[in-house]
């Protein structure tokens, strides 16, 4: 993680340096393996928050699309793994959302090599005892309908390894959410017809800090939203 080397506001934990190494300042690979074992012994599963769309940058401004100096050599040496360095301007335009960046170097999921890197990383986590994943910024990963087969690979992993996979698809219309629900569970504040495939939330750092949607809501109002 970028926060292993630089000053660490919370969002630096959402800037990975790559997928070759498991472990960071919060714990080693062995620590994770032990945590998973203890959890299973107590009837619990560990889900890992996987940031697979964006990679750590060197800073803001002109450096936002420059890779951090500690990024994995594998990623540094292959530019085809990345999207063009152009930030999304219209989040309602699916072409922009799946092909442009989120203000950091962003991976190109139309490239099978990118897909294989992420799937291999997930398999190594499963081998350590991890029971599932929250896939960050899932709405920035193209769907099967958009010509990308990565969701097929996630579904195969979920079915064959018996793990729980949910992808973050927030602030999206129901027709976008429904492109993901046949393959994985969807973490969203939104709604769609396939409620069995949804993991819904009302309050998060996005709804409160980023967009201010829940700032004016009382605790009771937020609890009622969860009940719905």
Image (spheres, rainbow, N blue to C red):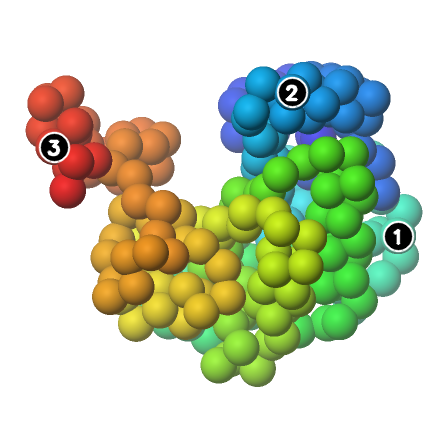
Who's the residue at 49% across and 49% down the image?
166
Per the rendering, the mark at residue 41 is 2
Please state the horizontal and vertical placement of residue 31, each as a whole percent of the image: 77, 18
Q: For the residue labelled by badge 1, is the local secondary structure a helix, a strand or a loop?
A: helix
Of callouts 2 and 1, the N-terminal one: 2
Who's the residue at 72% across and 48% down the image?
122
Q: CA distance from mark 3 to mark 2?
A: 34 Å
Who's the residue at 34% across and 37% down the image?
206
Front in this rendered view, residue 39 or 171: 39
Q: Mark 3 against mark 1, which lies toward the viewer?
A: 3
- In terms of image quadrants, where is residue 209? top left
Please state the horizontal and vertical placement of residue 196, each as a whole percent of the image: 33, 56
Where does the N terminus fall, quadrant-wise? Answer: top right
Q: Which residue is mark 1?
A: 74
Q: Which residue is mark 3?
A: 224
> In the rendered image of this protein, does residue 42 appear above or below residue 135?
above
Q: For the residue labelled by badge 3, is the local secondary structure a helix, a strand or a loop?
A: helix
Of callouts 3 and 2, the N-terminal one: 2
């Amino acid at each position: 993680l970028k926060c292993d080397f630089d000053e660490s506001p919370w969002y630096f934990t959402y800037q990975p340096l790559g997928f070759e190494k498991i472990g960071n300042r919060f714990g080693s690979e062995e620590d994770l393996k032990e945590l998973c074992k203890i959890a299973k012994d107590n009837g619990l599963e560990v889900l890992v928050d996987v940031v697979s769309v964006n990679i750590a940058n060197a800073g803001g401004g002109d450096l936002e699309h420059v890779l951090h100096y500690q990024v994995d050599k594998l990623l540094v040496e292959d530019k085809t793994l990345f999207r063009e360095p152009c930030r999304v301007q219209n989040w309602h335009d699916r072409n922009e959302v799946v092909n442009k960046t989120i203000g950091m170097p962003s991976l190109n999921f139309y490239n099978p090599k990118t897909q294989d890197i992420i799937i291999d990383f997930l398999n190594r986590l499963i081998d350590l005892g991890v029971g599932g994943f929250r896939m960050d910024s899932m709405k920035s990963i193209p769907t099967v309908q958009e010509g990308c087969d990565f969701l097929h690979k996630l579904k195969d992993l979920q079915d064959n390894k018996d793990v729980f996979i949910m992808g973050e698809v927030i602030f999206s219309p129901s027709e976008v959410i429904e492109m993901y629900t046949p393959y994985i569970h969807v973490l969203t504040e939104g709604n769609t017809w396939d409620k069995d495939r949804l993991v819904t939330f009302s309050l998060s750092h996005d709804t409160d800090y980023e967009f201010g949607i829940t700032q004016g809501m009382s605790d009771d109002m937020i609890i009622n939203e969860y009940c719905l």
